[in-house]
Image (cartoon, helix red, strand yellow):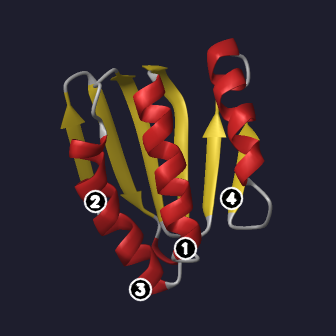
Amino acid sequence: MERKLRAGSLVIDVEDRGADGPRVVWQGKSSDRHPETVLEPFFATLVEECAARGVSMEMRFERLHHFNSSTIGYLIKLIQDMRARTVPLVIYFDHALLWQKLSFEALRVFSKDKLLQIRGA
């Protein structure tokens, strides 16, 4: 499951961790006004594979320098899609970066069970 997505200044690397599921590392900037056009097909395949294998997904945002509200909107949709497929998601963000802390703390409203965990690193 080694993959990479490049979309403008956004780079997403996928590392296969076997039974632990994929680690998805976000880097650069996500500024597209319609990020779902690129992100949806990329993540649809990953979520499908996680569901089929019965594994969780880990997303790392520490190397992301910026994302816009459109990206947050897509992440909310992705969280909901993963919950519907019962694919657990663990999100790591850089707790020292105020913009990341505010953004990801706001997403905690979706972490009502073990299917979503949000951790400051």
User: Three-letter amino acid code at disc 1?
Assistant: Ala
**Disc 1 or disc 2, which is closer to the eye?**
1
Where residue 98 appears, as percent x and y from the top left, is 70, 13
User: Three-letter amino acid code at disc 4?
Assistant: Leu
In whole angstroms, how far apart are the C-alphas of marks 4 and 3? 18 Å
**Disc 3 or disc 1, which is closer to the eye?**
1
Q: Of helix, strand and loop, which one carries label 1? A: helix
**Disc 4 or disc 2, which is closer to the eye?**
4
Q: Of helix, strand and loop, which one carries label 4? A: strand
- Badge 1 is on which residue? 84
In whole angstroms, how far apart are the C-alphas of marks 4 and 2? 23 Å
In which quadrant of the rendered view does residue 105 lie?
A: top right
**Mark 4 crowd level (few <14, some 14–19, many ≥20, 10 Å Cα):** many
User: Three-letter amino acid code at disc 2?
Assistant: Glu
Contact check, label 3 and label 2, Cβ < 8 Å = no
In which quadrant of the rendered view does residue 52 lie?
A: bottom left
Horizontal placement of 101 versus 5: left or right?
right
Name the N-terminal-most of marks 3 and 2: 2
Tell me the residue at 36%/53% (across/down): 14
* Residue nearest the viewer, comparing 32 with 49: 32
In whole angstroms, how far apart are the C-alphas of marks 1 and 4? 12 Å
In whole angstroms, how far apart are the C-alphas of marks 3 and 1? 14 Å
**Mark 3 crowd level (few <14, some 14–19, many ≥20, 10 Å Cα):** few
User: Three-letter amino acid code at disc 3?
Assistant: Ala
Where residue 119 appears, as percent x and y from the top left, is 74, 42
Where residue 58 appears, as percent x and y from the top left, is 55, 55
In whole angstroms, how far apart are the C-alphas of marks 1 and 2? 25 Å
